[in-house]
Image (cartoon, rainbow, N blue to C red):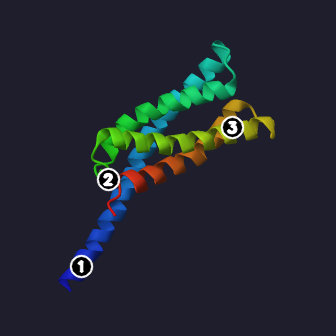
Amino acid sequence: MKNKIADIYSKFMLKNETFTQAVKYFIVGGFCTVLDFALLFILTHFVGLNYLTSSIISFMSGTVLNYFLCTYWIFKVKVVENRKHEFIFYVIITAIGLVINTLLIWSFTEYWGLYFMLSKLMATFVTYWWNFGARKYFLHTIR
């Protein structure tokens, strides 16, 4: 009976921890998204870069900030102890997210005729779930 209670408690804490991490990730993601959107708009409208080039630069800027905030505030468990290796894995996950994000923005803008900022908003929802899920699973879950 004591083991069963401990098992239930452990599962509850794991679910609660994931929920807490998701909320914190949402806050960090929101802050980084504001940076991402602001840079996208500034680089496209004021600097004159193509919206896809601006999107890649702004996405990567938000990602670097996101990395540091996530590793120091959200995810306490580290699967990869070497910080350089962890960053390499983080970059790989982010690169996949960048491809998803860029393809969605391009598709929504070029094929659906949407304003690129609206396309970015829609792509952000998809990319958010990829980034959180992949980072949580590959970098911060003990197996």
Image quarter (top left, top right, bottom left or bottom right) of the N terminus: bottom left
Residue hosting label 3:
105
Give the residue displayed 65% in from the left and 42% down from the top: 122
Which residue is identified by label 2?
79
Q: Which mark is residue 99?
A: none
Q: Is residue 142 visible?
A: yes
Residue 57 found in image quarter: top right
Quarter of the figure that contains the C terminus: bottom left
- The residue furthest top is 47
Look at discs 1 and 3 and give the one toward the viewer: 3
Q: Secondary structure at mark 2?
A: loop
Neighbourhood count class around disc 2 (C-alpha, 10 Å): few under 14, some 14–19, many 20 upward: some
Q: At 30% from the left edge and 40% from the top edge, which residue is drawn?
A: 83
Amino acid on which the number 2 mark rests in the picture: Val
Residue 6 in picture, x, y percent from top left: 22, 75
Does 110 sit left or right of 95 as displayed? right
Q: CA distance from mark 2 to mark 3?
A: 32 Å
Circle 1 residue: 5
Label 1 crowding class (10 Å Cα cut-off): few <14, some 14-19, many 20+? few
